[in-house]
Image (cartoon, coloured by chain):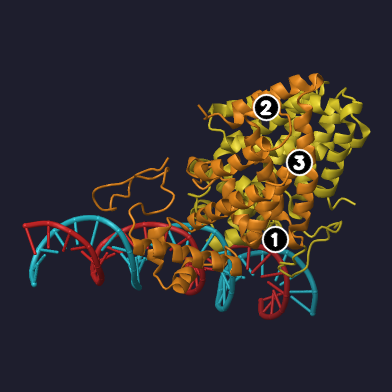
Chain colours: A orange, B yellow, C red, D cyan
Amino acid sequence: MGEPRDSGTGRTGSDDDGVAVARDRVENTTARGDERKALILDTALRLFERDGYEKTTMRAIAKEAGVSVGNAYYYFASKDHLIQAFYDEVSDRHVEQALAAMRPHRGLAPRLSADLHAWIDVAEPYREFAAQFVKNAVDPNSPLSPFSPESKPTRDKVIDVHRRAVLGSTAKIDREIAESLPELLWMHHMAIVLFWVYDRSADARRTRELIDRTTPIVARVIGLSRFKMVRPLFREGEKLIRDFLLPDEQ
Amino acid sequence: MGEPRDSGTGRTGSDDDGVAVARDRVENTTARGDERKALILDTALRLFERDGYEKTTMRAIAKEAGVSVGNAYYYFASKDHLIQAFYDEVSDRHVEQALAAMRPHRGLAPRLSADLHAWIDVAEPYREFAAQFVKNAVDPNSPLSPFSPESKPTRDKVIDVHRRAVLGSTAKIDREIAESLPELLWMHHMAIVLFWVYDRSADARRTRELIDRTTPIVARVIGLSRFKMVRPLFREGEKLIRDFLLPDEQ
DNA sequence: CCCCGAACTTGAACGCGTTCAAGTCGACTG
DNA sequence: CAGTCGACTTGAACGCGTTCAAGTTCGGGG
């Protein structure tokens, strides 16, 4: 998963135009380097939160962190890569909080609801600048897209939470759809995130409402899969998802 | 909601129905001005097609068109606005071609299929740089988003084509969902466009396959709406859409 | 014929993300 | 201790999107 992209010599030979770029700049680190990197990231997130993404310049981040611009670029390949780091952090916190929030519930809808509300809880302080993340999310040329190989580790962690939401519930899931269901739920999750980014209401009230109203529907649709009448429809949908959305899982 | 962002001078006596659009820079135009604007846009699209969006600089566009950089900005408020102009043009051609392509068919699925294939036909030459459009499409802060008020006229034209796809078919549509169906189909359309942007296959073969396989499913789901068993589900979904996706339609 | 003002045109300058040649530093080697 | 090596650090410079003060052009009113 991790690209070494390591070279015994220095980093001079940069004419290999990298499509597959490592997430961050450095692989080799020292204790001091880790500190520095964390310092820059923390400073960046703080400024993003305060001033928004666009208005926060790399020069401002560097200055505030007490380092040079070039130094920030030593640790993060680009300004966008700071977003990736943000996404990683939010995802980790989401995993933890979602698992805790789901625990008391057994029904599928409440568990999904708790799962998604946990995301909002964690990400809400950064809503405004999360728009930038979504923008990247959708650019197929960016290695920062959540669909990209580079994002797979983090994405898989989140999908796994959705898997646990299903497995821990009392819902009887049709075997055929069970396997790709977590990925489907991740799509639902992404749709919610998209709505949330547009949401202007205080405390993301409308997004929370949307979660409360879509999760029962999702649960009910999943439940429907057991009925004969709609079986062919689900089978076709299932195949479609497998063919088009998950083409690389071998 | 409404930003003035106006150049301030008088405007041509156009019948305004209330939507103050600042899509492009100029309102007052002369014949020569229109020519110039078209020249710049054509040059830009040509270079975008040849070199891609990012690699085409405003300086290059200006130079190639034989104008100054500042002049390009007199006609287009930003580089992104050139994309908006592109979207308008593609949409117009899509409307025309889609209506012609649907005409021979009566079934809902074939009509939808023809409708969407027409989009691909028209947009295919620009697939690579269309990624940029999608990127904007998803940024809520940009007036270029297809969800934005500024894009409404163009969006409505496309939605109307989807409406005709339904009305011209033999399908019996449940009354309750009939009204917001065109908007829903537009969402489906946008999803297809998203896939298309990621599609690396020659001639967008996989996207066309996706269209061929999703349109029957869509048609079938719509047909299901008449069955009692799933009525409450549809009713709930319908309300959801009305509350969350179309909040401004009074 | 001159003049006014609105439409148009210009290119230098600004701010920003990003790059890179030229360092500094500290641990380890001989 | 001098020397070496690689991790780290720097800030000037580059290219790009964008702005703007200062023009130029041109139709029409006096």
> Earlier along the polypeptide chain: callout 2 or callout 3?
3
Q: Residue furthest front?
A: A104
- Viewer-nearest of discs 2 and 3: 3
Q: Amino acid at mark 3?
A: Ala
Image coords of residue B80 (percent x, y): 61, 54
Q: Give the Cα separation between the discs numbered 2 and 1.
A: 54 Å
Q: Give the Cα separation between the discs numbered 1 and 3.
A: 52 Å
Tag 1 and tag 3, C-beta contact below 8 Å: no
Which residue bears the numbered disc 3? A109
Chain containing the residue with disc 3: A
Q: Secondary structure at mark 2?
A: helix
Chain containing the residue with disc 2: A
Which residue bears the numbered disc 2? A177
Query: Which residue is more in the foreground, A7 or A204?
Result: A204
Q: Are marks 1 and 3 on the same chain?
A: no
Chain containing the residue with disc 1: B
Q: Secondary structure at mark 3?
A: helix
Find residue B240 and report its image quarter.
top right
Q: Secondary structure at mark 1?
A: loop
Image coords of residue A96 (percent x, y): 59, 51
Which residue bears the numbered disc 1? B26
Q: Are marks 2 and 1 on the same chain?
A: no
Kindly identify the residue that appears in the image at 85 percent across and 26 percent down. Answer: B224
Location of the N terminus of chain B (image quadrant): bottom right
